[in-house]
Image (cartoon, grey):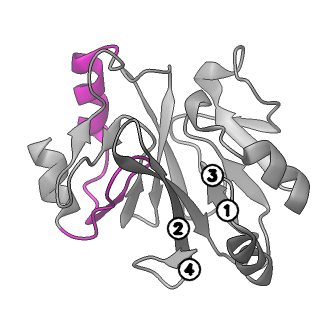
Amino acid sequence: MKQLHRDDLFGWSVFQDSLDLDFNSLAWVRAGGNVLIDPLPLREHDLEHLRALGGAKFIFLTNSMHVRDAQHLAQVFGAQVFGPLAEKDTFPLRCDGWLTDGDEPVPGLRVFSLDGSKTPGELAFVLESTTLISGDLIRAHRPGTLHLLPPPKLKDRAAAMKSIARLPRCEVVLVGDGWHLFHDGAKKLDAL
């Protein structure tokens, strides 16, 4: 796993040939139990790295299209899995709990529900008021930029823009798809 902009944040990626961009996953290492967000499969080296960091206690999924390797990693580490409440009736994986707007499933991680994306109630997270973590709706096809999920997968542009307007303007934006943005996140969100 790669260390990100904080000592307690790590990421790993898989290149998606059909879209010509990376799919990204995150690990937040914390005293109350480590958190994985939208976890992709880990290479053996990275799996051992995560074990050395204390494994995982929680897995948070932004949407049903980002289940990825959550079930396997939950079994490996005995982690609890949480998905978006708006998808509870159709979610493809058994979850231990459901998250919605305003929740704080662990101290320092605030949940925002987003409308207009390809799945209802897609989640975004704000980590300690400094870092926005997105799933599909906000992405980055080129370094230093932010983009919306493109049509036809974007269900309702107006609802999506209203949801994005509610998000805190964080300096760092970590995206589920594409290039992470480590500077000027607030300006790029406003430009979006």
Judge depth for marks 2 and 1 and give the one in front: 2
Residue wearing tag 2: 11
As measured in the structure, the alpha-carbon distance from the residue carrying label 3 to the one carrying label 4 is: 19 Å
How far from the left and from the top, in percent, is residue 12? 54, 64
Residue 68 on image: x %, y %: 65, 42
3 lies above or below 33? below
Measured in 3D between alpha carbons, the distance from the residue under mark 2 to the one under mark 4, in whole angstroms, is 10 Å
Image position of 41 with respect to 165: above or below: below
- Give the class, few, some or many, for how many residues have Cα within 10 Å of label 2's Cα (few <14, many ≥20): some
In percent of width and height, residue 98 lies at 70, 34
Q: Which residue is mark 4?
A: 8
The span from disc 1 to disc 4 (Cα, nearest Å) is: 11 Å
What is the distance, in whole Å, between disc 3 and disc 2 at their CAs?
10 Å
Circle nearer the N terminus (1, 3):
1
**Residue 167 versus residue 82: which sits nearer the camera?**
82
The quarter in which the N terminus is drawn is bottom right
Residue topped by disc 1: 35
Depth check, front residue: 82 or 23: 23
Q: Position of residue 142 (x, y in %)?
A: 20, 53
- For marks 1 and 3, give the CA distance: 13 Å
Q: Which residues are magenta?
A: 155-183
Q: Residue at x 71, y 46 (%)?
A: 69
- Residue 86, by quadrant, is top right
Say which quarter of the image contains residue 191: top left
Q: Earlier in the sequence, mark 2 or mark 1?
A: 2
Of residues 137 and 130, which is closer to you in this image?
Answer: 137
Res. 144 mark: none
Looking at the image, residue 190 sits to the left or right of residue 88; the answer is: left
Residue found 51% across the figure and 59% down from its top:
13
Residue plotted at (49% across, 21% down): 119
CB atoms at circles 3 and 2 under 8 Å apart?
Answer: no
Crowding near the residue tagged with mark 1, few <14, some 14–19, many ≥20 C-alpha atoms within 10 Å: many
